[in-house]
Amino acid sequence: MTATDFSKLSYPELLKLSDELNKQIEAQRAEELKVLADGYVKKAQAAGFTLQEAIEALRPYTSDARSRKRVNGPAKALYQDPANPANTWSGRGMPAKWLAAYESQGRSRDEFRVN
């Protein structure tokens, strides 16, 4: 590979060269990505895994999985305390303390369900 003196090229020539170089870079990137993917598939199959299993195993390494945010906001309240309507519970996780207290008195959770 020989060094080129780019300082002698005109602006339009540099733009044309840049476009050609970007096309070559993209073509080379695609080829190397294909080689990488082919090697990955062969390794997964040789180890006795399906391609789908191998892809699922990669999921924790994707930036998508690490930066996933709640899309729908907080869960809707499914239960409400009649003595204090500000006390609600979505039905997810541990029951709210106010609801657990009512249940310990023998009351049914269904009594507090919001329609």
Image (tube, rainbow, N blue to C red):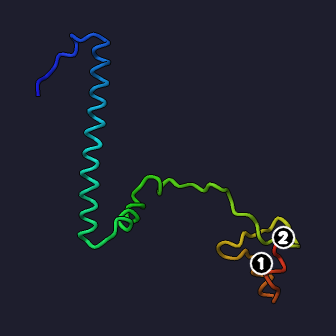
| Extreme-left residue of the structure | 2
| Extreme-right residue of the structure | 83
Q: Is residue 52 above or below residue 109?
A: above
- Location of mark 2 (residue): 115
Q: Quadrant of the N terminus?
A: top left
Residue 84 x, y percent position in the rendering:
86, 69
Number of other residues with Cα within 10 Å of mark 1, as a class: few under 14, some 14 to 19, many 20 or more: many
Q: Residue at x 28, y 73 (%)?
A: 48
Q: Residue at x 77, y 87 (%)?
A: 104
- Location of mark 1 (residue): 99
Residue type at mark 1 is: Leu
Residue 67 x, y percent position in the rendering:
50, 53
The CA distance from mark 2 to mark 1 is 17 Å
Q: Is residue 1 above or below residue 61?
A: above
For numbered disc 1, what is the local secondary structure?
Answer: helix
Which mark is in front, 2 or 1?
2
Q: Residue 72, which numbered label?
A: none
Q: Write down the quadrant of residue 62 in the picture.
A: bottom left
Residue 72 x, y percent position in the rendering:
66, 56
| Left or right: 98 in relation to 15 | right
Q: Is residue 68 above or below residue 31?
A: below
Number of other residues with Cα within 10 Å of mark 2, as a class: few under 14, some 14 to 19, many 20 or more: few
| Left or right: 87 in relation to 7 | right
The foreground one among 114 and 27 is 27
For numbered disc 2, what is the local secondary structure?
Answer: loop
The foreground one among 47 and 61 is 47
The foreground one among 17 and 114 is 17
| First along the sequence among labels 2 and 1 | 1
Residue type at mark 2 is: Asn
The foreground one among 12 and 83 is 12
Q: Quadrant of the C terminus?
A: bottom right
